[in-house]
Image (tube, rainbow, N blue to C red):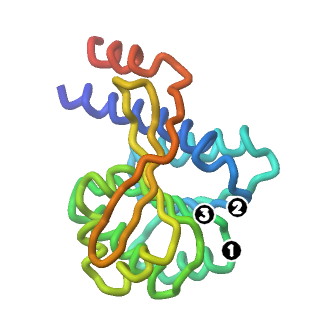
Amino acid sequence: MERKVAERRLLESAYAGEIVGSTVLKDYNKVAVITESGRGPAALASSVMASFLATNPRGNIRVYLHKEEEVEKIIEEVIEYEPSAILLLFQCDDEDSIGAFMEMLRRLAENMVEVDLILHSTCVESGALKEATEEEKVGEYLSQMPAFTYSLEEKKGYMLLKEIYFEESVLELEGLEEYPLKYPFVELLKEQGES
């Protein structure tokens, strides 16, 4: 059963990455992806990159792999790169992942990196974003930067892009745009669950 769950998560990551890269990021020219190690994040980052470049051949995308001892170096490289968007791809499914996500968000806030922030859905769903906003500097940063997340609405047949609003210690999400699932995603998930 554990293998089935892992396979399904891998499929979801690859599919979500394809949609994020081809739709959510389509209007950006320079994108920085900051992610962690692991199969899910690797599948997600790889499919984001491939679909972004297929959709936007003149676009530029860089991936930075989070390592605790290199956080400052990563932030310096991202600042020097000057992206128009930063995509934070952290699973936020355990303490290490949540800690890494919060550290990256904290460092972006400390440096007031002016970009559109796009957060992987699990950063919001897990409560990690809410926890991060309890830090005054992070809350202040998020209240000033455009921030977005997304969720796969499998049964409804679309991915929903949401804007994140943070004001006076209140975190709110507002649906912005629906991106239809291009492939028979629900069918793939059903097959994955049955085999």
State the SS at label 3: strand
State the image coordinates of residue 1 (x, y, percent, origin top left): 17, 25
The reply to whether callout 3 and callout 1 are in contact (CB within 8 Å) is no
What residue appears at the point 44 percent right and 21 percent down from the top-left corner? 185
Quadrant of the image occupied by residue 61? bottom right
Crowd class of label 1 (few under 14; some 14 to 19; many from 20; radius 10 Å): some
The reply, left or right, for residue 147 in relation to residue 103 is right
- Residue 70 shows in this picture: no
**Disc with the residue nearer the chain's start (3 vs 2):** 2
Vertical order, 138 against 171 (above or below): below
Question: Which quarter of the rendered picture does the C terminus lie within?
Answer: top left
Q: Which residue is mark 2?
A: 30
State the image coordinates of residue 13 (x, y, percent, origin top left): 43, 38
Depth check: 131 or 100 in front? 131
Crowd class of label 2 (few under 14; some 14 to 19; many from 20; radius 10 Å): some
Crowd class of label 3 (few under 14; some 14 to 19; many from 20; radius 10 Å): many
Amino acid identity at mark 2: Lys
Amino acid identity at mark 1: Glu
Q: Which residue is mark 3?
A: 85
State the SS at label 2: strand
Amino acid identity at mark 3: Ala
State the SS at label 1: loop
State the image coordinates of residue 142 (x, y, percent, origin top left): 42, 74
The reply to whether callout 2 and callout 1 are in contact (CB within 8 Å) is yes
Q: Which residue is mark 1?
A: 82
What residue appears at the point 25 percent right and 78 percent down from the top-left corner? 134
The reply to whether callout 3 and callout 2 are in contact (CB within 8 Å) is yes
**Disc with the residue nearer the chain's start (2 vs 1):** 2
Depth check: 143 or 35 in front? 143
State the image coordinates of residue 35 (x, y, percent, origin top left): 46, 59
